[in-house]
Image: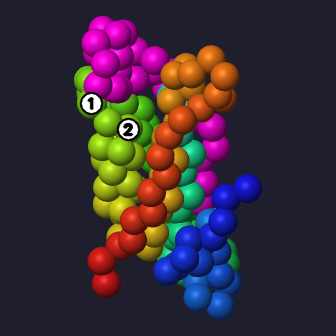
Amino acid sequence: MTQPLRAVPLADGRAGLRHVFVRDLLLECRVGVHKHERLRAQPVRVNLDLSVRETPAKEGAGADKLAHIVDYEIIVERTRKIAARGHVNLIETLAERIAAVCLEDARVRAVRVRVEKLDVFPDAASVGVEIERFADG
């Protein structure tokens, strides 16, 4: 179980924050420093936790609209595009790029990105990195 972001809570009704997440997104990526990692894609799992400033929406016409929220479909599509761009040496680089696109939306106050390589060691489920990044201001 992941722990809450330290500097910014994931969700806090008093602070007007909600938790938007993506769990176990499976991608094929060319990532790694070894020759065999450069030649073929490998399975990678991505988990995202975003602390999002809520947009006040009044009840009635127009309240139940996609424009009032951070759309996880857009986050997933941007993550897929990053993974498809081509080879990167480090999963840390991949995680930083994903965090950066999440923070492009000004409503996102903080993001935690976990990237795991799934087929590195036969006796380990995964290896990876987890980072937290925060919006400026």
Residue at the location (64% across, 28% down)? 124
Q: Which residues fall within the magenta stretch?
A: 20-43
- Left or right position of 81 against 126: left
Judged from this view, the residue extending furthest toward the right is 1
Is disc 1 in contact with disc 2, using a CB cutoff of under 8 Å?
Answer: yes
Identify which residue, 126 or 112, lies in the foreground: 126
Residue behind mark 1: 88
Circle 1: element type:
loop
State the residue position of label 2.
91
Say if the magenta span includes residue 24. Answer: yes
Q: Tell me if residue 37 comes above or below residue 17 in the rendering.
A: above
Q: Is residue 137 magenta?
A: no
Q: Position of residue 79 (x, y in %)?
A: 41, 39
Provide the secondary structure element on which disc 2 rests: helix
Q: Is residue 28 visible?
A: yes
Task: Classify 104 as above or below 13.
Answer: above
Quadrant where the image shows the C terminus? bottom left
Q: Where is residue 87 in the image (x, y as percent from the top left)?
A: 26, 24
- Taking the view exactly as shown, the residue that stands out farthest to the bottom is 14
Mark 1: amino acid: Val
Residue 19: where, in percent of width, then height? 62, 66
Residue type for callout 2 = Ile
